[in-house]
Image (spheres, rainbow, N blue to C red):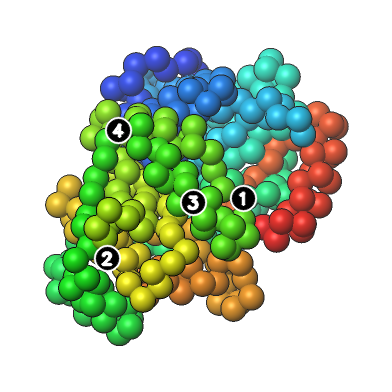
Amino acid sequence: MAKKFTVKKITNKDAWEKFVLKNKPQSFLHSWNWGEINNELGSKIIRLGFYESSKLVGVVLLIKQNAKRGSHFLVPGGPIIDWNNKSLVSFCIKSIKELGKQEKVWFIRVRPELLDTDQNKKLFSKFGFVSAPMHLHAENTWILDISKSEEEILKEMRKTTRYLIKKSLNESLEFEFSKSPNDSPILAKLQDETAKRHKFIGFSEKLFKHEIEKFADDDQGGLFYVKKGNEILAATIIVFYGHIGYYHHSGSVSGNTKIPFSYFLQWRVIQEAKKRGCTHYNFWGVAPNDNPKHRFAGVSLFKKGFGGEQIDWLHAQDLPLSSLYWSTYIFESIRKKLRRL
């Protein structure tokens, strides 16, 4: 006899968070607050729960984007379900597909917390998904195990990284933390400098403001920055979710290259993550390979110097719901080449 599943919207924050946090791997991209942040930015948020009898067995956060290139749902870091339960997976995809048609979206883009394997690619292909022309959040990530002692973590770093951390501790640098969304211009200004320096398009101050506000309200993160005297040299938004600390957005000044302030900031944040009981630190995106010409090559070298391992998540998958999707596919494919994404 086939299992009977039901689906309904979830409006209770505690129920949502309890389910997401008990599952592994988990992701702040499917946290309650990530939904709230996107709601503040103007997107329609739909949270669905999947039930077997009265037991919650899966959730999905749908973020509706009314973009010029076509209305669509984004599902970052989810759905969170047992992917080995074929009946549940089928019911989940069928449910979000039906909702997508009701909401008149052209396609649904998901980037679940599933490893980038041929088996997982085949799973999505079976349900009609195609490989998306664009990524959805960091797909190639660098993860550091911080359950070890500080001495062990330092020992396993690249020699140069360890040296620069120790050097930074003698540079009279200050480590600051802010929970105030009014400090979002600090990061916005520094990211503008960084974006010009490395030729990429940064994120909006509005995003930074809401991200600091929502996660700080639940003591799940905020803005960390490093100063020397009155000058702020680098800043980052760190999210502490479950057992992981996430290095999410960042920016730094163009000068003061002789002071290893970025190493100081990372080390202090790692120490803070350990104090909060995190077992892992996620440096977020890195280059997919060791190609020295990749636009992330420099920052990847920096992150990898702290030790750790690369985790490659399944590339974003698109479920077309309208023939109009293919115009989006062509547009994004061209833009990807132009922006070297």
| Number of the label disc, if any, that sits on residue 201 | 1
Q: Position of residue 100 (x, y in %)?
A: 67, 23
* Observer able to see residue 230: yes
Determine crowd level at label 2: few under 14, some 14-19, many 20+ residues with C-alpha closer than 10 A: many
Mark 2 vs mark 1, CA separation in Å: 26 Å
Q: Nearer the viewer, residue 27 or 190?
A: 190
Q: Position of residue 127 (x, y in %)?
A: 68, 39
Q: On the rendered image, what quadrant is the C terminus found in?
A: bottom right
Compared to 13, does 23 lie above or below? below
N-terminal label among 4 and 2 = 4
N-terminal label among 4 and 3 = 4
Identify residue for label 3.
191
Identify residue for label 4.
180
Mark 4 vs mark 3, CA separation in Å: 18 Å
Determine crowd level at label 4: few under 14, some 14-19, many 20+ residues with C-alpha closer than 10 A: some
Q: Do the residues labelled 3 and 1 touch (CB within 8 Å)?
A: no
* Residue for point 51% across, 58% down: 194
Q: Position of residue 302 (x, y in %)?
A: 42, 71
